[in-house]
Amino acid sequence: MIQDQTPPVIEFRSVALTYPGPPPVPALLPCDLTVRRGEYVTVVGPSGSGKSTFLNIAGLLDAPTSGTYLLDGIDTTSIKDKERTALRGSRIGFVFQAFHLLAHRSASENVELAMVYQRVRRSQRRARAHAALVRVGLSHRLEALPTRLSGGERQRVAIARALVTEPSLLLCDEPTGNLDSATADSVLELLDQLHRDGATIVAITHDPQVAARGQRTVSIRDGLLTDTAGRKVIA
């Protein structure tokens, strides 16, 4: 049998982050974590556990103070800030709890903005934005302003914006935190479908019901990343 030689999307090797003091504050303790292409992994933990630190490192918003983080096999800890920014823009799609849509831009325009930094030609941006919105079920809301959209629709626009650059990783931070239970379930069903279509998803959440949608769950508490049995994560 031929083994898949594609590098993991995420590979943490003894990754840790300590904020300088005095006194120094360890926000993420040394951990190893592998997320392979096509996986759906959820990360759970209470407030102040280190989830945001994990998100910031995985999303290339912060660099670890020790260890090595490989994204698609690229050593992100040995590249310059400009290169890290370009890597983040091309390979990671973010979905946030608060949507972060521009209120005076249409759904299509909000999605198009994700492609500006990739220097996609203007003539191509609109078509790709429309295709992404159709993919998330918003073919009837292409030109609607966020102020005219429901919470679930706004989150779908945010997901379309994350998908339109065809990233390696869909990184979700409390994706249902601002939604009622029925709307949250429809958004989670959309993420399930994207996963079935081959998307690699990492979702950070405090909600056990959201966490259960993933293929596997890791926990973080007091900066320590563990599996569901309480063992330190090593794979």
Image: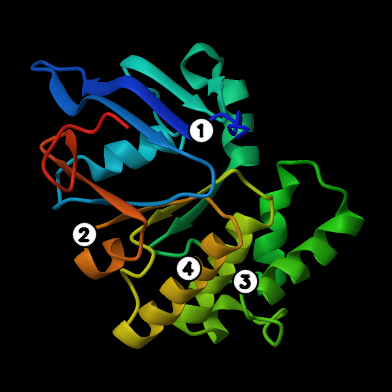
Residue displayed at 81% across by 58% down: 125
Question: Would you say 24 lies left or right of 162 here?
Answer: left
Local packing at callout 4 (Cα closer than 10 Å; few below 14, some 14-19, many 20+) is some
- Between label 3 and label 1, give the one nearer the viewer: 1
Marks 4 and 1, Cα distance to the nearest angstrom? 20 Å
Q: Which residue is mark 3?
A: 104
Comparing 178 with 222, the one in front is 222
Residue lying at the far front in this picture: please name it.
1
State how far apart marks 1 and 2 are (Cα): 25 Å
Say which residue label 1 marks. 8
First in sequence: mark 4 vs mark 3:
3
Marks 2 and 3, the one that precedes in the sequence: 3
**Residue sitting at 40 percent across and 23 percent down?**
63
Instruction: Assess disc 3: are there few (<14), some (14-19) or many (≥20) residues with their C-alpha within 10 Å of its C-alpha.
Output: few
Residue 188 position within the rendered picture, expressed as x and y whole percent measured from the top left: 42, 72
* Residue type indicated by callout 2: His
Instruction: Please report whichever mark, 2 or 4, sits nearer to the chain's N-terminal start.
Output: 4
Compared with 134, 204 (above or below) is above
Q: Secondary structure at mark 2?
A: loop
Spatial separation of the CA atoms under disc 2 and disc 3? 31 Å
Q: In the drawing, what numbered circle is on residue 136?
A: none
Q: Position of residue 223 (x, y in %)?
A: 16, 34
Residue 106 visible in rendering: no
Query: Which quadrant of the figure contains the N terminus?
Result: top right
**Residue 99 is at least partly visible in this image:** yes
- Foreground: disc 4 or disc 3: 4
Say few, some or many: other residues with alpha carbon within 10 Å of mark 2 (under 14 / 14 to 19 / 20 or more). some
